[in-house]
Amino acid sequence: MKVSISLSAELIERIDREAAREPGQSRSRVIEAWLWRASRRAAAARLASETIAYYEKLSEAERAEDHQWARFSTGELARLGDE
Protein backbone atom coordinates (compact mmCIF):
# COMPACT_ATOMS: atom_id res chain seq x y z
CA MET A 1 0.00 0.00 0.00
CA LYS A 2 1.28 3.44 -0.83
CA VAL A 3 0.84 6.38 1.56
CA SER A 4 1.96 9.97 1.29
CA ILE A 5 3.20 11.84 4.38
CA SER A 6 5.04 15.08 5.10
CA LEU A 7 8.23 14.94 7.17
CA SER A 8 10.75 17.52 8.33
CA ALA A 9 14.01 17.92 6.42
CA GLU A 10 15.92 16.81 9.52
CA LEU A 11 13.97 13.56 9.73
CA ILE A 12 14.44 12.91 5.99
CA GLU A 13 18.20 13.36 6.49
CA ARG A 14 18.16 10.79 9.31
CA ILE A 15 16.16 8.38 7.17
CA ASP A 16 18.55 8.83 4.26
CA ARG A 17 21.59 8.25 6.51
CA GLU A 18 20.01 5.05 7.82
CA ALA A 19 19.11 3.88 4.31
CA ALA A 20 22.66 4.54 3.11
CA ARG A 21 24.09 2.16 5.73
CA GLU A 22 22.81 -0.88 3.82
CA PRO A 23 23.02 -1.05 0.03
CA GLY A 24 19.64 -1.26 -1.63
CA GLN A 25 17.74 -0.15 1.46
CA SER A 26 15.04 2.36 0.64
CA ARG A 27 13.47 5.16 2.64
CA SER A 28 10.29 3.11 2.77
CA ARG A 29 12.08 0.15 4.35
CA VAL A 30 13.73 2.38 6.95
CA ILE A 31 10.46 4.09 7.85
CA GLU A 32 8.58 0.78 7.99
CA ALA A 33 11.24 -0.77 10.25
CA TRP A 34 11.12 2.28 12.55
CA LEU A 35 7.34 2.16 12.70
CA TRP A 36 7.31 -1.57 13.50
CA ARG A 37 9.84 -1.05 16.31
CA ALA A 38 7.81 1.85 17.71
CA SER A 39 4.64 -0.21 17.46
CA ARG A 40 6.21 -3.15 19.32
CA ARG A 41 7.57 -0.84 22.03
CA ALA A 42 4.15 0.80 22.44
CA ALA A 43 2.46 -2.61 22.68
CA ALA A 44 5.01 -3.78 25.28
CA ALA A 45 4.54 -0.57 27.29
CA ARG A 46 0.77 -0.96 27.14
CA LEU A 47 1.00 -4.59 28.28
CA ALA A 48 3.29 -3.60 31.16
CA SER A 49 0.91 -0.84 32.18
CA GLU A 50 -2.11 -3.15 32.03
CA THR A 51 -0.24 -5.82 34.00
CA ILE A 52 0.67 -3.33 36.72
CA ALA A 53 -2.92 -2.10 36.86
CA TYR A 54 -4.16 -5.70 37.16
CA TYR A 55 -1.88 -6.53 40.07
CA GLU A 56 -2.57 -3.23 41.83
CA LYS A 57 -6.28 -4.06 41.86
CA LEU A 58 -5.83 -7.46 43.52
CA SER A 59 -7.16 -7.86 47.03
CA GLU A 60 -4.82 -9.05 49.79
CA ALA A 61 -6.34 -12.54 49.54
CA GLU A 62 -5.77 -12.60 45.77
CA ARG A 63 -2.18 -11.39 46.24
CA ALA A 64 -1.55 -14.14 48.80
CA GLU A 65 -2.96 -16.76 46.44
CA ASP A 66 -0.87 -15.42 43.56
CA HIS A 67 2.23 -15.54 45.76
CA GLN A 68 1.47 -19.17 46.69
CA TRP A 69 1.07 -20.12 43.02
CA ALA A 70 4.34 -18.37 42.19
CA ARG A 71 6.22 -20.24 44.93
CA PHE A 72 4.66 -23.54 43.87
CA SER A 73 5.45 -23.10 40.18
CA THR A 74 9.01 -21.96 40.91
CA GLY A 75 9.53 -25.03 43.06
CA GLU A 76 8.11 -27.30 40.37
CA LEU A 77 10.34 -25.78 37.71
CA ALA A 78 13.37 -26.29 39.93
CA ARG A 79 12.32 -29.87 40.59
CA LEU A 80 11.90 -30.55 36.86
CA GLY A 81 15.31 -29.07 36.20
CA ASP A 82 16.84 -31.53 38.64
CA GLU A 83 15.39 -34.55 36.86
Image: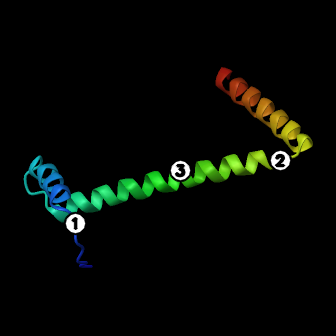
Give x and y (percent) for residue 12.
16, 59
Q: Where is mark 1, residue-wise?
A: 7
Tag 2 secondary structure:
loop
Give x and y (percent) for residue 78.
69, 24
Q: CA distance from mark 1 to mark 2?
A: 45 Å
Residue type indicated by callout 3: Ala
Residue type indicated by callout 1: Leu
Q: How many marks?
A: 3
- Side of 47 relative to 35 (left or right): right
Who's the residue at 59% across and 53% down the image?
Answer: 47
Residue 45 got which mark? 3
Q: Please determine whether, in this image, residue 47 is positioned above or below residue 75.
A: below
| Quadrant holding the C terminus | top right
Who's the residue at 20% across and 57% down the image?
Answer: 11
Sequence order check, earlier mark of 1 and 2:
1
Q: Callout 2: 10 Å neighbours few (<14), some, many (20+)? A: few
Residue type indicated by callout 2: Leu
Q: CA distance from mark 3 to mark 2?
A: 20 Å
- Side of 22 relative to 65 (left or right): left
Q: CA distance from mark 3 to mark 1?
A: 26 Å
| Quadrant holding the N terminus | bottom left
Sequence order check, earlier mark of 3 and 1:
1
Q: Please determine whether, in this image, residue 51 is positioned above or below residue 35.
A: above
Q: Callout 3: 10 Å neighbours few (<14), some, many (20+)? A: few
Residue 58 got which mark? 2
